[in-house]
Image (cartoon, rainbow, N blue to C red):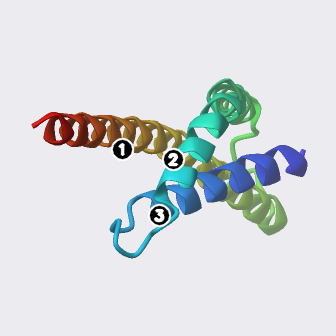
Amino acid sequence: MALEWVVIGYAAGAEAIMLILLTLPQSINPLRKGLISATKALLKPFLSVVPFGLFLIMDINWKYRTRLTCSSDNCSPIDYLRHEKSILKSQRNAILIAAALLFYWLLYSVTKLLDRIDELDQRIQKLKNQD
Protein backbone atom coordinates (compact mmCIF):
# COMPACT_ATOMS: atom_id res chain seq x y z
CA MET A 1 0.00 0.00 0.00
CA ALA A 2 2.93 2.34 0.47
CA LEU A 3 3.89 2.18 -3.22
CA GLU A 4 0.88 4.25 -4.28
CA TRP A 5 1.90 7.04 -1.90
CA VAL A 6 5.46 6.94 -3.19
CA VAL A 7 4.18 7.25 -6.77
CA ILE A 8 1.93 10.22 -6.03
CA GLY A 9 4.70 11.81 -3.95
CA TYR A 10 7.19 11.52 -6.81
CA ALA A 11 4.61 12.86 -9.26
CA ALA A 12 3.94 15.87 -7.02
CA GLY A 13 7.68 16.44 -6.63
CA ALA A 14 8.29 16.26 -10.39
CA GLU A 15 5.42 18.66 -11.02
CA ALA A 16 6.79 21.08 -8.43
CA ILE A 17 10.30 20.98 -9.92
CA MET A 18 8.97 21.59 -13.45
CA LEU A 19 6.82 24.42 -12.15
CA ILE A 20 9.82 26.06 -10.47
CA LEU A 21 11.93 25.73 -13.61
CA LEU A 22 9.17 27.15 -15.80
CA THR A 23 8.64 30.17 -13.60
CA LEU A 24 12.29 31.23 -13.53
CA PRO A 25 12.94 34.49 -15.41
CA GLN A 26 13.78 34.01 -19.07
CA SER A 27 17.21 35.64 -18.70
CA ILE A 28 18.22 32.99 -16.14
CA ASN A 29 16.60 30.10 -17.98
CA PRO A 30 17.95 29.84 -21.56
CA LEU A 31 16.39 26.38 -22.04
CA ARG A 32 12.84 27.62 -21.56
CA LYS A 33 11.56 26.67 -25.03
CA GLY A 34 12.77 23.10 -24.67
CA LEU A 35 11.40 22.91 -21.16
CA ILE A 36 8.00 24.17 -22.32
CA SER A 37 7.83 21.55 -25.07
CA ALA A 38 8.93 18.79 -22.68
CA THR A 39 6.35 19.89 -20.13
CA LYS A 40 3.62 19.99 -22.77
CA ALA A 41 4.54 16.44 -23.72
CA LEU A 42 4.42 15.32 -20.08
CA LEU A 43 1.06 16.92 -19.28
CA LYS A 44 -0.93 14.03 -20.73
CA PRO A 45 0.89 11.31 -18.74
CA PHE A 46 0.66 13.45 -15.60
CA LEU A 47 -3.10 13.67 -16.12
CA SER A 48 -3.25 10.18 -14.62
CA VAL A 49 -2.56 11.87 -11.27
CA VAL A 50 -6.16 13.13 -11.23
CA PRO A 51 -8.05 9.79 -11.26
CA PHE A 52 -5.31 8.19 -9.14
CA GLY A 53 -5.69 10.98 -6.57
CA LEU A 54 -9.47 10.56 -6.57
CA PHE A 55 -9.05 6.81 -6.02
CA LEU A 56 -6.72 7.49 -3.09
CA ILE A 57 -9.18 9.99 -1.62
CA MET A 58 -11.87 7.30 -1.78
CA ASP A 59 -9.44 4.91 -0.09
CA ILE A 60 -8.82 7.42 2.73
CA ASN A 61 -12.57 7.94 3.09
CA TRP A 62 -13.22 4.19 3.29
CA LYS A 63 -10.49 3.76 5.90
CA TYR A 64 -11.90 6.66 7.88
CA ARG A 65 -15.42 5.23 7.86
CA THR A 66 -14.35 1.70 8.82
CA ARG A 67 -11.80 2.73 11.44
CA LEU A 68 -12.48 1.77 15.02
CA THR A 69 -13.29 4.75 17.17
CA CYS A 70 -11.29 5.01 20.31
CA SER A 71 -12.87 6.62 23.31
CA SER A 72 -11.09 6.88 26.62
CA ASP A 73 -12.98 3.98 28.26
CA ASN A 74 -12.56 1.13 25.82
CA CYS A 75 -9.02 1.65 24.48
CA SER A 76 -5.64 0.72 25.79
CA PRO A 77 -2.80 3.24 25.36
CA ILE A 78 -1.44 1.21 22.44
CA ASP A 79 -4.82 1.25 20.69
CA TYR A 80 -5.11 4.98 21.29
CA LEU A 81 -1.65 5.62 19.78
CA ARG A 82 -2.48 3.41 16.80
CA HIS A 83 -5.70 5.37 16.31
CA GLU A 84 -3.91 8.73 16.48
CA LYS A 85 -1.19 7.53 14.10
CA SER A 86 -3.81 6.39 11.62
CA ILE A 87 -5.52 9.77 11.73
CA LEU A 88 -2.23 11.61 11.20
CA LYS A 89 -1.30 9.37 8.26
CA SER A 90 -4.70 9.98 6.66
CA GLN A 91 -4.30 13.73 7.04
CA ARG A 92 -0.77 13.60 5.60
CA ASN A 93 -1.94 11.55 2.63
CA ALA A 94 -4.86 13.91 1.97
CA ILE A 95 -2.45 16.86 1.94
CA LEU A 96 -0.18 14.96 -0.47
CA ILE A 97 -3.07 14.30 -2.83
CA ALA A 98 -4.21 17.92 -2.68
CA ALA A 99 -0.66 19.09 -3.40
CA ALA A 100 -0.33 16.76 -6.40
CA LEU A 101 -3.64 17.95 -7.86
CA LEU A 102 -2.81 21.60 -7.20
CA PHE A 103 0.65 21.27 -8.76
CA TYR A 104 -0.86 19.59 -11.84
CA TRP A 105 -3.37 22.41 -12.26
CA LEU A 106 -0.66 25.07 -11.80
CA LEU A 107 1.67 23.29 -14.20
CA TYR A 108 -1.08 23.08 -16.81
CA SER A 109 -1.99 26.76 -16.38
CA VAL A 110 1.61 28.02 -16.45
CA THR A 111 2.48 25.89 -19.48
CA LYS A 112 -0.52 27.15 -21.43
CA LEU A 113 0.28 30.74 -20.41
CA LEU A 114 3.93 30.45 -21.48
CA ASP A 115 2.90 28.80 -24.74
CA ARG A 116 0.54 31.67 -25.43
CA ILE A 117 3.27 34.21 -24.59
CA ASP A 118 5.66 32.53 -27.04
CA GLU A 119 2.96 32.54 -29.70
CA LEU A 120 2.35 36.26 -29.18
CA ASP A 121 6.11 36.96 -29.27
CA GLN A 122 6.32 35.20 -32.62
CA ARG A 123 3.42 37.30 -33.94
CA ILE A 124 5.16 40.48 -32.78
CA GLN A 125 8.39 39.44 -34.50
CA LYS A 126 6.47 38.63 -37.68
CA LEU A 127 4.76 42.03 -37.63
CA LYS A 128 8.10 43.80 -37.00
CA ASN A 129 9.68 41.94 -39.92
CA GLN A 130 6.81 42.96 -42.23
CA ASP A 131 7.35 46.68 -41.44
Numbered disc in front, either 3 or 2: 2
Q: Residue at x 70, y 28 (%)?
A: 48
- The residues tagged by marks 3 and 2 sit, at their Cα atoms, a distance apart of 12 Å
Viewer-side residue, 85 vs 107: 107
Residues at discs 1 and 2 in contact (Cβ within 8 Å): yes
Residue 13: image location, x then y, percent: 64, 59
Residue 27: image location, x then y, percent: 34, 72
Which secondary structure, mark 1? helix
* Labelled disc at residue 124: none
N-terminal of the two: label 1 or label 3?
3
Which secondary structure, mark 3? helix
Q: Would you say residue 123 is visible in this rendering? A: yes
Residue identifier under label 3: 20
Q: Residues within 10 Å of mark 3 (few under 14, many from 20)?
A: few
Q: Residue at x 67, y 59 (%)?
A: 84
Which quadrant of the structure image shows residue 23?
bottom left
* Labelled disc at residue 114: 1
Q: Residue at x 9, y 37 (%)?
A: 131
For the N terminus, give its image quadrant. top right
Residue 49: image location, x then y, percent: 66, 34
